[in-house]
């Protein structure tokens, strides 16, 4: 633990923060309009510069090519030495769209097994509905195909453990697609925490609010959608019979049968990023509350969710509390941030920048003696003058530092680079199955806590409800 009584920013720390010779900071500091603020532009990682011959490409198949799947595929193909050879989806129009973008020669199939059985497929991106994650991921790992698995890792905790078992048994690289763990911004926040720049961490808060129909999962439904172009039976494999309902297919995140609610969809980003920054395995107690406050469109997922989490002290961090929020009817316009609060300052993480604000504890605490009689006040004033003698005025160091990612920076590209480097070179995976479940587990328990109206205990080491 750090000394809680230490003064604020020391000279060595200031030099590092201002960018004057610090190896950990790339780029030069720019003095902003506020004299007490320094702005530093972070440099992106130098990744993907090597070129590869056509015979050395990693051939990708993308399974589940809705909006997220196509987005993941676009980012993956920006990495040198990659090629898309096959796509799989249960809606024909999406596969046709992929051929429009990447060529008619791309193989298409509604059956993921067809894709996994192809000898020209080296690795797969899985961006399906949550309820299909486990089955397809385990099948891919057993087929020897490295997996990029969209978050949340699985729909249930038990499924997550089965995926981890398959990952360990096969030794095939698996990365969970919550890209904040690969972000230069989150790496910088981690460095600031480790350097003690905000003192002892005691509280973290994060939110991801939205105020739009599409942001609240009211995705467009094609009028022509039917069982002729949607494989409805496969989609609901293992479930009770239900007539085709396009809302359940195209707006699947609204329903617990296929998704994991706002906690599984958005809290998991906040968990994974924060866990990476502070080196945490997760909370030991989870409490969630929420309800359906605005989007009364037939969904069974809440549109406002709040979560409270107790994190125990570990060798990496002190005990602290976490508060998370999602509001899909946010009249202020929405947005997302994470704030990490310590005894000496705060780190505020936005979309493209980090702000470090230092709070300097005064050397003297001040006096609260107005309710004492005159003689006692005089007595205390003499004591105070001896205990805290006047000192010479000191230069005021900057108390705010802004670290900015370059324009156009994409942490998802860095995340894919980590996966491809693991496939090619055996590099360590930043977010393997265990990390992924430690982020997904508390999110899934948030939903359970809302349903059961009680707090739940979680063992972050064994990743089990305790």
Image (tube, rainbow, N blue to C red):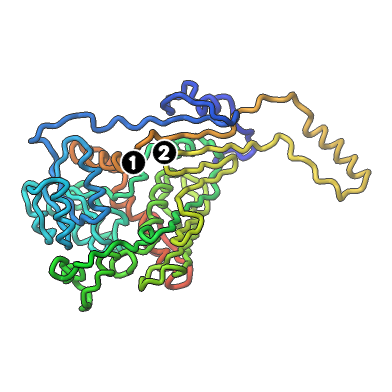
Quadrant of the image for the C terminus?
Answer: bottom left
The N terminus lies in quadrant: top right
Name the spot of residue 148 as percent of width and height, x first: 23, 49
* Percent coordinates x, y for residue 281 in the rendering: 40, 51
The residue that appears at 74% across and 40% down in the rendered structure is 365
Which mark is first along the chain, 1 or 2? 2
Query: Residue 158 falls in which quadrant of the image?
Result: bottom left
Q: Quadrant of residue 352?
A: top left
| Residue pointed to by mark 1 | 411
Q: Nearer the viewer, residue 219 or 233?
A: 219
- The front one of 244 and 170 is 244
Q: Nearer the viewer, residue 161 or 276?
A: 276
For label 1, the SS is: helix
Q: Eyeballing the image, is 44 above or below 312?
A: above
Q: Are marks 2 and 1 in contact (CB under 8 Å)?
A: yes
Q: Is residue 56 left or right of residue 459?
A: left
In this view, the residue farthest toward the right is: 375
Circle 2 crowding by C-alpha within 10 Å: few under 14, some 14–19, many from 20: many
Q: Residue at x 86, y 50 (%)?
A: 371
Residue at 18% across, 70% down: 226
Q: Residue furthest front?
A: 223
Please indicate, yes or no, whether residue 210 appears anywhere in the rendered image: yes
Categorize mark 1 by other alpha carbons within 10 Å: few (<14), some (14-19), many (20+). many
Of 11 and 106, which appears nearest the observer? 106
Q: Which residue is mark 2?
A: 185
Residue at position x 33%, y 69% in the image: 256
């Amino acid at each position: 633990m750090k000394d809680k009584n230490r003064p604020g920013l020391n000279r060595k720390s200031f030099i590092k923060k201002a960018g004057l010779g610090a190896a950990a900071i790339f780029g030069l500091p720019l003095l902003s309009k506020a004299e007490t603020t320094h702005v530093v532009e972070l440099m992106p990682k130098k990744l993907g510069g090597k070129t590869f011959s056509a015979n050395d490409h990693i051939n990708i198949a993308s399974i589940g090519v809705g909006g997220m799947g196509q987005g993941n595929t676009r980012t993956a193909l920006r990495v040198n030495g990659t090629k898309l050879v096959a796509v799989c989806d249960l809606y024909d129009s999406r596969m046709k769209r992929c051929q429009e973008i990447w060529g008619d020669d791309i193989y298409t199939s509604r059956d993921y097994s067809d894709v996994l059985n192809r000898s020209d497929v080296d690795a797969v991106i899985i961006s399906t509905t949550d309820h299909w994650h486990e089955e397809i991921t385990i099948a891919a790992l057993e087929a020897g195909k490295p997996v990029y698995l969209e978050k949340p890792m699985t729909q249930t905790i038990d499924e997550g453990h089965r995926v981890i078992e398959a990952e360990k048994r096969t030794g095939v690289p698996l990365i969970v697609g919550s890209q904040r763990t690969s972000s230069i911004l989150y790496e910088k926040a981690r460095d600031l925490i480790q350097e003690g720049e905000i003192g002892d961490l005691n509280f973290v808060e994060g939110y991801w609010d939205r105020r739009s129909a599409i942001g609240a999962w009211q995705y467009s439904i094609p009028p022509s959608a039917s069982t002729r172009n949607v494989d409805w039976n496969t989609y609901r494999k293992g479930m009770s019979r239900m007539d085709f309902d396009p809302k359940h297919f195209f707006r699947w995140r609204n329903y617990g049968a296929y998704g994991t609610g706002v906690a599984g969809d958005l809290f998991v980003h906040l968990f994974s990023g924060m866990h990476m920054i502070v080196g945490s395995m997760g909370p030991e107690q989870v409490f969630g509350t929420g309800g359906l406050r605005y989007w009364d469109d037939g969904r069974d997922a809440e549109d406002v969710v709040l979560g409270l989490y107790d994190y125990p002290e570990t060798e990496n961090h002190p005990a602290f509390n976490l508060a998370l929020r999602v509001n899909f009817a946010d009249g202020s316009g929405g947005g997302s941030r994470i704030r990490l609060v310590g005894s000496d300052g705060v780190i505020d993480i936005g979309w493209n920048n980090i702000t470090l604000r230092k709070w300097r504890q005064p050397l003297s605490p001040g006096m609260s003696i107005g309710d004492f009689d005159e003689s006692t006040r005089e007595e205390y004033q003499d004591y105070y003058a001896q205990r805290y003698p006047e000192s010479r005025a000191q230069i005021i160091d900057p108390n705010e530092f802004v670290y900015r990612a370059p324009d156009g920076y994409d942490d998802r590209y860095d995340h894919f680079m980590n996966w491809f480097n693991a496939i090619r070179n055996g590099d360590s995976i930043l977010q393997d199955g265990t990390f992924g479940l430690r982020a997904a587990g508390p999110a899934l328990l948030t939903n359970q806590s809302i349903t059961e109206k009680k707090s739940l205990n979680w063992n972050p080491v064994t990743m089990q409800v305790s």
